[in-house]
Amino acid sequence: MSFKRFIYPLWIAFILLFAAMHAWHLRADFPNFSPWQDWSKYTDEGWYGNAAIRAHLFGNWYVPGDFNPAPAVPVWPFLEWVLFFFTGVSIQAARGLAIGFFFLNLLLSYKLFRERGPAWVGLFAVTLLVTSPFLYCFSRLAILEPLLLALTLGSLNLAVRLPRFRHQEAVAALLGLLFTMMMFTKTTALFLLPALIWVIALPLWKHQKRRLFRLLVAAGGASVLSFSLWMLLVVNNDLFADYKYLFFINNYVKPHGIWDRLMSFWWAFHGGLWVDMLLIPLAGLLVLSTLYARRRDWTEGLWLDPMFGGSVLIVAGYLGFMTYQNHPQPRYYTVVAFFSFFVVVRVTAQLLYQRANLRRIGLALVALICIDAAVNGIWTLKYVLHPQYTFVTAAENLTRYIDQHPNGNRLLVSISGDDITLITHLQTLCDDFGTEELPTKLAQYQPGWYATWNDLDPGTLEDLHVHFSLEQVAQFPAFDDPDRNMLYLFKLHPLPNGEVREAHGTNLQQSMPEDNFDVDID
């Protein structure tokens, strides 16, 4: 008892210190020269909150024809919209909201473990979460995953406690509403549904099927009703095209045939190594071990534990999504990271309470995991102590140049435009996404500036040439990706007398006589 009184406060202080480090240097970039080249660090922080950003800065959340994801994923921009009333629009505030959800996720993870185990097991799991350099990097971005995890963990905490509630149908309806919020946070939540159903059904399946049926009807009815009400609102406000567009741009080429599907699965499965080179393979090995030894004494209770089975199903569901999508990105694995760590901790704890030989295996796993956590903690500390500000500096210098060299409309066109708006409040359009073709948007909004990373895309250049000639005026180093480490700024000069060029083949996909730039067209 005296040992616990001594070690637990130190352990909790260690966790709190590492958790707090996630909130330092909120303006700092996603760490350069990390193993994770993810598109989200160039675009997603602005994209998915652009409704809130525009509403506060420009008085209208909606820009016709541009990329407006809020009708499909409204929860995150709504929360940012509320937050900005108190903080103003800033990248620190947006990232602070994501960090707040990361803190909540730590608490919910601990509560999930405490429901069926001792305190040390929950603390062990949280330790892996706060020391992970992968989670450090992605939890500090104002992207959708931290909120999705918070809603998922909140739903799981409610679901495992569902049999103890007095008004179970009401709690089940609340779970249905939470699932709708998950879907309206990130549509990949659909692949988490089997895990939620498993956790609800497991304690009731054998002896209380009628009650289980009522609970599932209550949860499903609440989810369908809330989803339908939102969709009615979307359709009635002529926003269905924007809703569908989010699915259109995420419609990647799907694998065909057994071999292609196997390769897609391997790509998704192998991507787990982005998270942790030891813990992710260990999680897979431990799951296979429990399946192989499912009739042995030491696995008793594991597959009847809704947290263990739910975690396995969540990981499997997300890997299934990435296999189907055939386009895994590192940020997707934040969900996989949480629940894979849960699997490792849950099975290791199970082994520690078995007979001598199995207990020794458990102790060896604890030692191995602690070494991994120590290495990860040092790696995370390196990122904490060496913040970098290349992108925010580039955005600020770009905006300063525009303000010091007026060129008609101050409006900027760029794929990273919404991120730049979040950082510097410069009004922007997206050149790559939108429900209207780029030449139509250009004619309507008449921007004065264009920014691109490293080179000019021939298709985008063709669209720009319909109305403008380009003059290269500045460049700003940022980030570490060899394909996106220099942000080039161009003045857009309208063609004389409002001329509109016609595209014939690839005639506008090359430098024109009126242009002045030396950036590669690629």
Image: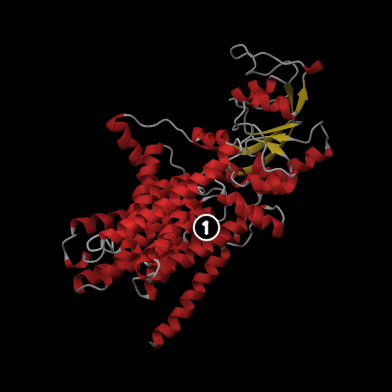
* Colour convention of the picture: secondary structure
Q: Position of residue 184 (x, y in %)?
A: 51, 48
Quarter placement of the C terminus: top right
Q: How many residues crowd around disc 1 within 10 Å: few (fewer than 14), some, or many (20 or more)?
A: many
Name the image quarter holding residue 210. bottom left
Q: Is residue 22 left or right of residue 285?
A: right
On-image quarter of the N terminus: bottom left
Residue 350 drawn at (x, y percent)? 27, 68
Q: Is residue 325 visible?
A: yes
Tell me the residue at 51%/33% (across/down): 249
Left or right of 166, for residue 133: right
Q: Name the image quarter holding residue 50.
A: top right
| Residue 423 relative to residue 252: left or right | right
Residue 201 percent coordinates (x, y): 30, 58
Question: Which type of secondary structure does the marked residue at label 1 adopt?
Answer: helix
Residue 27 appears anywhere in the view: no
Find residue 403 and report its image quarter: top right
Q: Position of residue 175 (x, y in %)?
A: 43, 58
Q: Nearer the viewer, residue 339 or 131?
A: 339
Given residues 243 and 141, the one toward you in this image is 243
Identified by mark 1, the residue type is: Tyr
The structure residue drawn at horizontal position 38% and vertical position 60%, both measured from the top left corner, is 341
Q: Exactly how many numbered labels are in the figure?
A: 1
Nearer to the camera, 26 or 517: 26
The residue positioned farthest toward the top in the image shown: 504
Q: According to the image, label 1 marks what residue?
A: 136
Q: Residue at x 47, y 56 (%)?
A: 178
